[in-house]
Image (spheres, rainbow, N blue to C red):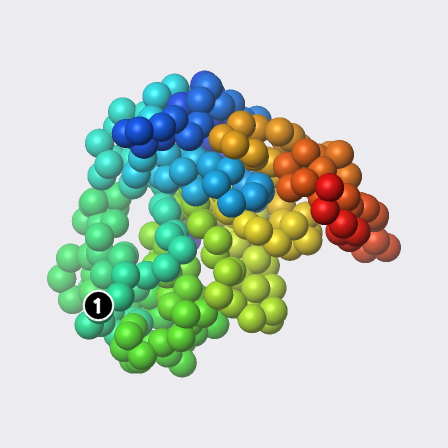
Amino acid sequence: MSQAPAFYADTLQVSHLSTGYRDRQVIQNLSLPPVRPGEVHSLLGPNAAGKSTLLRALAGLQAATGSIQLGPQELVGLPLAEHARRVTYMPQTLPQGVALSVLESVLGALQASATDRPGEHQGRAGHEADQRRAVAVLERVGILHLAMEGLDHLSGGQRQLVSLAQSLVREPRVLLLDEPISALDLQHQLRVMRLVHELARERGMIAIMVLHDLQIAARWSDGIVMLAQGAVVATGAPAQAITPDTLARVYGVRARVEHCSRGSLQIMVDDVL
C-alpha cells in the first residue's frame, strides 16, 4: 500500500434500490442498514437470490434506480468512471487470455486508477512508487513469489488472489467482493478474510462481499444481509440475522445455531424442510 493511506469516513446508505435485466426485475425497492467506515458486511442467500446483481448495482455495473449514497455523494446516475473512483469491484474470476505477469496486472490496475490521484504515476519517480506499492500489496496478499508468473499459468485460487491484489492496490473507499474465497483452500480463505477485515479497520474502508459459507460470514462480518428472491429477509449482526428461523425461510433447512466459546456462531444443518 502507499506509505500513508487515507482513512475514509463516509457511510454507505442504500435506499429504495431497484435493478434487474431487460426481461425481469431482480431487486425492487430494497433498502439496507447504513454501512459505516471500517465495517465488513456479507450478502448471504441461495442461488438466484439477487446477491451478485445487488453487488453489481452497488458497483455501478448494473443500471439501477433509487439511492446509493456514499457520504454526501449520490452514486446512482454517476458515469461509470466516476463511480469506480469511489467503489472497487472484485469479480468472481479474472478474464482469460491476458498476456500479463501478476506484477504487470497489478500495476495496470493501479495505473487505471491514476485519475483519483492527480500528479501521481508520472515520470520515473512515479513509476518507482507504483512498483513499490504493487509489490507491497502482493506481499500482503501473500503472492509476491508469483510476481513474474503469467496470469494464464496460475491456478483458479491463485488468480482469485491476484484479483484481490488488483482491487486492494487501488486503496478503495468501498470494496465489493463477489465470492472472493470460492476457489481458495482453507488456509487462504482465512488469510483473505483476515486481510479484508484488517484493511477495513486500518483505513476506514467499507467491504461488502457475497459469500456462501455461513460459518465464515458469521466469524468475519460486522453485518449480515440475508436475501431471498431479491428481497431482504433479515439484517443485523451475525447473531441477529443468522437464526434457525431465517435459515428455514431463506434456505429451506432445519438448522441449529449455537455460540461457541470464542464468541462466533456454530451452524449445524440437520435436514431439509
Q: Quadrant of the N terminus?
A: bottom left
> Measured from the top left, where is residue 182 in percent x and y?
50, 60
Q: Give the residue type at disc 1.
A: Val
Which corner quadrant of the image does residue 149 belong to?
Answer: bottom left
| Residue 8 drawn above or below residue 74 | below
> Measured from the top left, where is residue 55 in percent x and y?
42, 39
Q: Secondary structure at mark 1?
A: loop
Which corner quadrant of the image does residue 110 belong to?
Answer: bottom left
Residue at the limit of the structure toward the right, as seen here: 261
| Residue 142 drawn above or below residue 193 | below
152 sits left or right of 269 in the view:
left
Q: Nearer the viewer, residue 50 or 203?
A: 50
Q: Residue at x 48, y 41 (%)?
A: 48
| Residue 15 drawn above or below residue 147 | above
Q: Quadrant of the C terminus?
A: top right
> Measured from the top left, where is residue 112 in percent x and y?
22, 52
Q: Nearer the viewer, residue 257 or 4?
A: 257
Q: Nearer the viewer, residue 242 or 141?
A: 242
Q: Is residue 130 visible?
A: no
Q: Residue at x 31, y 29 (%)?
A: 23
Which residue is disc 1 drawn over?
98
Q: Residue at x 56, y 43 (%)?
A: 46
Q: Is residue 24 visible?
A: yes
179 sits left or right of 248 in the view:
left
Q: Nearer the viewer, residue 15 or 38?
A: 15
158 sits left or right of 37 in the view:
left
